[in-house]
Amino acid sequence: MTTTRLEPGSLAPAFTLVDQDERAVTLRDLRGRRVILFFYPEAMTPGCTKEACDFRDSLAPLQAAGYTIFGISRDEPEKLRRFRERDGLTYDLLSDPDHAVHEKYAVWGEKVNYGKTFMGVIRSTFVIDEKGRISHALYNVRATGHVARVRALLGV
């Protein structure tokens, strides 16, 4: 399990995951494009819905600035499909049920909630440049206000 956080300038870990329609998405195929990956704990929960809808509402200016957005969670494609339809999400959601990609990006780790320690998803966002390198690595973010922070960081 990767515990070393990714730093700006490092190569984004390669992956192939399926989206909500069970189509394969490979990061390498996105070279030449700027990509935003946001990892969230679980589809259709309040915080994750807030973050996903904020990305949806900011999609036009982010796409105009050349960014492609993907949400990544441990949910199965069928649940991602329902989440996307329920909330009118207009970007793809990727399924990582065994959290292998979460581990590559160091977003699977210890969390504490109500005094109990457990393993879980650390809500995080990565901005990847056209050459496949991390330009921003934002770990342990809050759902509310996060997309506005990303937009400000990117000047979008």
Image: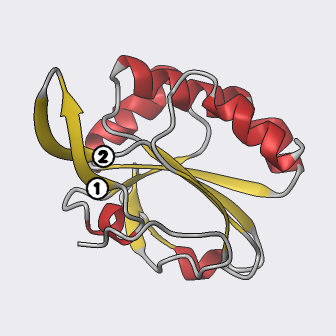
The residue under the point 78% across, 39% down is 151
The amino acid on which the numbered mark 2 sits, given as a three-letter code, is Val
Viewer can see residue 121: yes
Residue ID for mark 1: 108
74 to 51, vertically: above or below: below
Task: Describe residue 149's horizontal placement relative to residue 142 as left or right.
Answer: right
Badge 1 marks a residue whose secondary structure is strand
Give the vertical position of 55 relative to 110 (above or below): above
Question: Could you tell me which quadrant the C terminus lies in?
Answer: top right
Q: Quadrant of the N terminus?
A: bottom left
Tag 2 residue: 121
Left or right of residue 123: residue 103: left
Note whether residue 75 is visible: no
In the image shown, does 19 or 44 lie closer to the viewer?
44
Does the CB distance between marks 2 and 1 fall below 8 Å?
Answer: yes
Residue 57: % across, % down: 70, 26
